[in-house]
Image: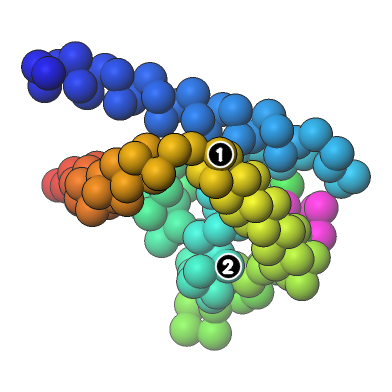
Amino acid sequence: MATRGLADDLSEVLVGIQRLLRRRLRRGLTVPRLRGAQVELLRLVAARPGIRVSVAAKELFLAGNSVSTLVNQLVRDGLLRRDPDPADGRAALLHPTPEAAARLAAWDARRSELVREQVARLSEADRVALTAALPALRRLAEGLHEEGEGP
């Protein structure tokens, strides 16, 4: 398969899987739905509690004012806590609230269960093929991340 065809097909399939996962997971939500950028910020803050807003903006490849807007929304909704940075009073350190941690954990558990169910329905040959593809997919993700961090 030509590289361009593979890249286009892979991109289309990955986007489609992500979209279908989101749609399925949104069914039955009992809390207001979060936008993609809000979830990305929450995930980053949960992984790195105490991260500065400016560092989060850089990590997410977003403008600082965009991240500040997201932070304000998530603080208002009780999902983030913004504390002054003791080293620099002008900066804020971000921490997830217990509610945010619970929401992320519940979403992750539901997503994992949904994917597990679908993978279990695949043939053994398909599961072997997916397992074999995982290292290459991880390298693809790493390359995209590293390229995004460029100059």
Locate the N terminus and report the quarter of the image it occupies: top left
Callout 2 touching callout 1 (CB < 8 Å): no
Question: What is the distance, in whole Å, between disc 2 and disc 1 at their CAs?
Answer: 32 Å
Residue 105 visible in the current orientation: yes
Colour convention = rainbow
Does 85 appear above or below 8? below
Does residue 11 appear left or right of residue 89 in this picture?
left
Mark 2 residue type: Ala
Q: Main secondary structure of the magenta part?
A: helix
Does residue 82 appear left or right of residue 54 in this picture?
right
Identify the residue at horizontal 62%, vertical 45% (top origin): 117
Magenta-colored stretch includes residue 79: no
Does residue 80 appear left or right of residue 141 in this picture?
right
Q: Residue furthest left?
A: 2
Mark 1 residue type: Arg
Q: Circle 2: is it few (<14), some (14-19), or many (20+) Cα within 10 Å? A: some
Residue 148 visible in the current orientation: no
Q: Which SS class for mark 2? A: helix
Q: Position of residue 9 (x, y in %)?
A: 29, 19
| Residue of label 2 | 46
- The boundaries of the magenta stretch are 74-78
